Amino acid sequence: MKLGFLIPVLIAFAIMCGIPPVFAETIKQTMEGGMELEITYPDTVVIGRDFPISVLVKNNGWEDKEQISFEFSSNEIIVPIKKNEIKIEKITEGGSYGETINFQITKDASVGEHFLNLKYSQVLLENNEVPRKPTNTNIAIPLTVKDQAKVNIHTITPESIFAQAEFPFTIEILSDDIDLKDVRIEIIPPKDIEFRGETLHTFSSIQKGEPLSITSRIITPSDEIQTEYKVPFQILVTYQDDVGEQKEDSKTVSLVLRPRTFMELTTDGGIWVGDFFIAPYVSLGTVIGIPAGALLSLLIRRKTQGPKKRKTKSKKK
């Protein structure tokens, strides 16, 4: 019976049994007598976690094979959970067989590249009757061991902000190693800064390797300031990891709140010229219709001259 279809079934079964899903790589080799071998393994593994190695062998030759075996061996950091070998009595012409073995990376493992060694052996039946000598092949399976999974928090913000304006505040969440569940993202601004929109976002899941972006808008205070200072924003991310544990990651971003300069462009298209604000919805023709020299002269006079005193009429006696 052909068993090639068992690979996706076995992977699904492994997930149901609590083995975290992984991104996979595949090694393909052709053995004596048309035996096609496929070894599927994760591209990265995490310290202290379990991971599967799946094998699939197909007999594409016209002679039967027997005494087929897969024997795994490694250093002390890669440990088989139940067994480290697969034995198959016989695979006839056109037949196939697939199976998955689970391993664990020990908690004291070092980060970096390690190898899981596989010794493959088979006996070819010449003319489907006479067994030949066993043939052995050694295959090295590379495994990249990573530290405990961590969520990357990236922010895109302006270098500095000033009063009486709005600014975009973008957060990007990325998990390189695992899928996340029950994700909660909270933005904690300083007391004198408000947000347009929500500061708390929840998601049922975030897939591994797929960035999630959230954009809000900062509303700065209306009171002008005389000196610049830093205002901290905290991003707090809580989630459930691939083995059901609650985890938390955070990041603090400090923005410079500074006095507004003579001319400032706002992100929504408005323009501050001194104390004079041109709203983004003012038509271009209206702005062009104001002579630039007159506008600047008016603003300069407002800056340099004090308020005009009212003349009072003297009463005649």
Image (cartoon, rainbow, N blue to C red):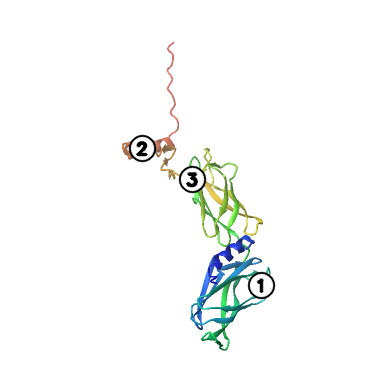
Residue hosting label 3: 167
Could you give the CA–CA distance between mark 3 and mark 1, rounded to whole angstroms?
A: 53 Å
What whole-number distance in Å separates the C-alpha atoms at marks 2 and 3?
Answer: 27 Å
Q: Is residue 281 above or below residue 208?
A: above
Q: Residue at x 53, y 81 (%)?
A: 64
Q: Position of residue 134 (x, y in %)?
A: 58, 86
Can residue 92 be seen here? The reply is: yes
User: x, y (%) of residue 41?
Assistant: 56, 70
**Residue drawn at point x = 58 percent, y = 79 percent:** 90
Question: Badge 1, how many Cα within 10 Å: few under 14, some, many 20+?
Answer: some
Disc 2 versus disc 3: nearer the observer: 3
Residue 138 picture quarter: bottom right
The quarter of the image holding the C terminus is: top left
**Residue holding disc 2:** 295
Characterize the local packing of mark 3: few (<14), some (14-19) or many (20 or more) Cα atoms within 10 angstroms. Answer: many
Q: Nearer the viewer, residue 66 or 261?
A: 66
Relative image position of residue 80 (x, y in whole percent)? 66, 72
- Lower sequence index among marks 2 and 3: 3
Camera-nearest label, 3 or 1: 1
**Circle number at residue 270:** none
Residue position for label 1: 80
Closer to the observer: label 1 or label 2? 1
Mark 2: which amino acid?
Answer: Leu
